Image (spheres, helix red, strand yellow):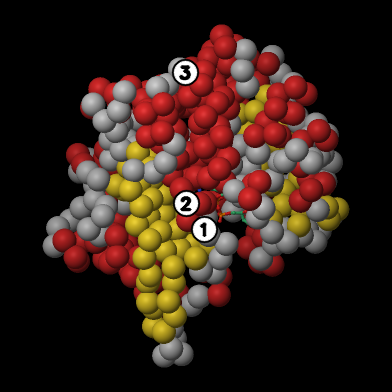
Amino acid sequence: MTSQLNPFEISQRQLDEAAALLGLSPAMHAFLRVPMRELQFTIPVQMDDGNFEIFQAFRVQYNDARGPAKGGIRFHPQETVDTVRALSAWMTWKTSVVDIPLGGSKGGVICDPRSLSTGELERLSRGYMRKVAYFIGPDKDVPAPDVYTTPQIMAWMLDEYEVITGHHLPGVITGKPVPLFGSLGRGDATARGGIYTVREAAKVLSLDLQGAAAAIQGYGNAGQFAHQLGRDLLGLKIVAISDTKGGIYDEKGLDFEAARAWKQETGSVVNFPGAKNITNAELLELPVTVLVPAALEGMITAENAGRIQAKIVAELANGPTTPEADQILFQRGAYVIPDFLCNAGGVTVSYFEQVQNAYNFYWKIEEVYERLDARMTTAFHAVHEMAEARKVHNRLAAYLVAVKRVAEAVATRGWAR
Ligand code: NAD
């Protein structure tokens, strides 16, 4: 990754623009520009062959003025402290834009989970929790899953935390399996929340989405559920999907159940019977109504933004669009639903999970959906109205809504003015 695309620098540039428009004082701006606390540590793990491997890991608490910090843990071979910092900043703006009483944080481990056995993965996950147990807690900082971390990993981490503290504290981590007091509806919450915002975007743009073509980049948790729910809730026709190995395209639409089964069977979506193989770059530039980046950062850049044809870009991934690309998409009239609004459904249902854990009383799935829809719809319109009022692109509008709330909390606490 070039320094031009360093995600933390991108997150700071985005904040700088919002700070100028909000007229934040230099002290407030400086305070919101960097994380409040960071932990960098090593996790020694005994591998199945008896040898030890040392993994580098991070936990960054960006800001907790509005409540306990909240953010997932990513296991990825290209993880860097700057990626974790950027993601922790975006978590801060995300919890704020959907107005839930939480701050922002993020964690990461440099590792390739696909090359680890189940036993090694469990020892790594428990090792992570042993190192951060004193730093986090239900009323301090609450982790969750992210790229390549799963409900099972959350369960191992919860168990380790409870063994260390000697208490049942399921609210220390979210995205847990339902039998271990996860929330119903957490699995597809990110995609579902994003699909609700696409529905609202179509309303303000007067677009009919029934049968409209959509393309999804990334076919993991977020991407697969976007395929299913895009079809079920909006009637979208998903014509292209992709993963690290490449993409596939069928103008008649890709069947969700068959595509998911193919991915599970073969490890990739490529070579799906009846579809044409395409590259990830080609997928982004298809003539579709809705484009859903659901992979990683830095996919839509100054280089390719001019060729993106989608009317709505629904960013389920964190940080898929660079600031230069934002300007280009705005000028082209593409309606971008920015990442920390579009993918806030996951953290919103994580918050519901914490609430249910705290009350030790669990909701029906319909209650989860209804409350998620209300939060996402309210947040979408707050951002849309801000964009209209200030004549700025949606990402900047989302920053204006979110940063203002965080700055108010920081000022009211007397941390900075
Ligand atoms: P995941 O690990 O389940 O899936 C990631 C997918 O992206 C995989 O299919 C992988 O093959 C694909 N991918 C990776 N690099 C790619 C590349 N260069 N080109 C094309 N495809 C690529 O992860 P996920 O949970 O679905 O997360 C995806 C994105 O959504 C991330 O940016 C994550 O931070 C964001 N997100 C996820 C959640 C959640 O609840 N899962 C919540 C908020 C944001």
Q: Is residue 379 visible?
A: no
Do the CB atoms of the residues marked 1 and 2 lie less than 8 Å apart? yes
Q: Amino acid at mark 1?
A: Thr
Label 2 residue SS? helix
The quadrant where residue 151 appears: bottom left
From the viewer's side, name the closer residue of 349 and 279. 279
Rendered-image quadrant of the N terminus: bottom right
Q: Which residue, given by chain and number where applicable, does mark 1 sit on?
A: 80
Q: Which residue, given by chain and number where applicable, does mark 2 sit on?
A: 84
The quadrant where residue 310 appears: top right
413 relative to 330 in the view: left or right: left
112 relative to 102 in the view: left or right: right
Within-10-Å neighbours for mark 2: few <14, some 14–19, many 20+: many
Q: Earlier in the sequence, mark 3 or mark 1?
A: 3
Q: Is residue 69 visible?
A: yes
Label 3 residue SS? helix
**Picture layout, residue 110 above or below residue 313:** below
Q: Amino acid at mark 2?
A: Val
Q: Which residue, given by chain and number where applicable, does mark 3 sit on?
A: 22
Q: Amino acid at mark 3?
A: Leu
Q: Position of residue 39 (x, y in %)?
A: 34, 57
**Picture layout, residue 388 above or below residue 352:** above
